[in-house]
Amino acid sequence: MNLAKDLAFLYGESAISAQTARYENAIGKFTSLYPQRTDFRVFSAPGRTEIGGNHTDHQHGCVLAAAVDLDIIAVIALHNEGVIRVKSEGYDPFEVDLSDLSLNSDDCSTASIVRGVCFKFAELGCNVGGFDMYCTSNIPSGGGISSSAAFETLIGTIIDICYNECKAGPVEIAKIGQFAENVYFGKNSGLMDQTASSVGSLVAIDFLDESNPKITKVDFDFENAGYSLCITDTKGSHADLTPDYDAIPYEMKMISDYFGKSYLRFVDETEFYREIPNLLKEIPERSILRAMHFFDDNKRAQREADALAKGDIDTFLALVSESGYSSQNLLQNIYSTSKPTCQELSLAIELSKKVLNSRGAVRVHGGGFAGTIQAFVPFDLLAEYTKTMDSLFGEGACMKLRIRPVGGYEING
């Protein structure tokens, strides 16, 4: 199999050698696991980075996001045996019986995601069929780059390409993935992660109508502008943080309910500010602050996309810094109030500012409370920045990412 052209497209010329070895190793593992399968196909689905709009997607807001060059790759062989068999590197194998795709609320596992994706395809009148799969990922688990959305995109892409002649398409695959995660896996989430992974590239997404999100590709190359996009995994534990994550949409809903709206996107901002004295009589101050963050960051995400479309990196970086301040002080998702002494994100952000010295930008990345920060680092500071972050959080904690031009993809397809 001649991989070089597709690998250069997905990962860049400099990564061809390492990625060739990675793919050849995956193919070797697949043939060892399924020696009877000689006709195989190869797929990839990327992780994602949130660039603008922190906790805005679940309020039907706007975000700026991108697929990245960390991904899950899969070697598969189709068959008509009525099951999907999955072996993921480092995990026990499992299989999903396609004759029973019913919801089991007690099963919140990777198998439940596969079952949920298949159920939704079938519910939409699409074809679903069996395959054997070996997959391997270089997306760090819990590293804030959404390995779950990548896996959902991977399964959806395989089913769409192999059994439905690409009739669903990237946006529908994203919706199917969100359904599987929300309903079958039992994890509430907006649609940003799956959309960024499935659509690919750098995209501005408006979720005003979540059933038909407006997606605009933004043509901008951070490296050509002299900046590296870095994500640092601070290795903070996500255990027991579900109440913190759930509190954000819950508190935002307190505000929208007050105005008789389902989400903050549909609340008039001017009326909100006029009503704050009355809101204070029945709604906690943090809820009000979090609503303020939404109104500002929703607009900021749109302004960030506009700045990049115009090639205005300075305005973009200033907006990223504003977003970071807002997340830290209004949204308040830098550390958990249940673990007030665990402040890895705060430490990483403040030391990032020391290294950057008013250049570039840094902010919390994704859900927050623990996990990752994002920085746009000038080339001449990259070595020092990486060394500083790795010295704090371990070798390889700071990851330099490349924006990937596509989402779910069949290699040599």
Image: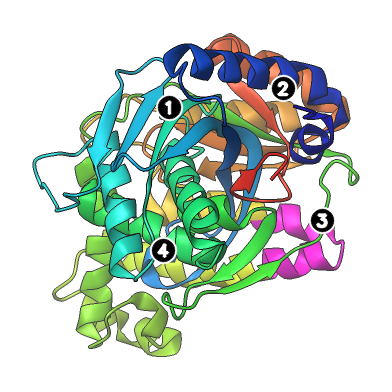
Instruction: Looking at the image, tell me whether mark 3 or mark 2 is earlier in sequence order.
Output: 2
**Label 4 sits on what residue type?**
Lys
N-term mark: 2 or 4:
2
| Color scheme of the displayed model | rainbow
Residues drawn in magenta: 303-319
Q: Residue at x 24, y 63 (%)?
A: 251
> Dots 1 and 3: beta carbons under 8 Å?
no
For the point 42% across and 46% down, the residue is 152
**Residue under numbered circle 3:** 220
- Disc 3/disc 2 C-alpha distance (Å): 25 Å
Between label 3 and label 2, give the one nearer the viewer: 2
Mark closer to the chain start, 3 or 4: 4
Residue 366 appears at what percent x and percent y?
A: 47, 45
Q: Secondary structure at mark 2?
A: helix
Q: Amino acid at mark 1?
A: Ser
What main secondary structure does the magenta stretch of the protein show? helix
Residue 351 image offset from top left, x and y in percent: 61, 26
Sequence-wise, the earlier of marks 1 and 3 is: 1
Please indicate whether residue 376 sits to the left or right of residue 59 in the image.
Answer: right
Q: Quarter-wise, where is residue 385 in the image? A: top right
Question: Mark 3: which secondary structure?
Answer: loop
Return the mark for residue 73.
none
Question: Which mark is drawn over residue 141?
Answer: 1
Residue sitting nearer the eye, 304 or 177: 177
Which residue is disc 4 drawn over?
A: 175
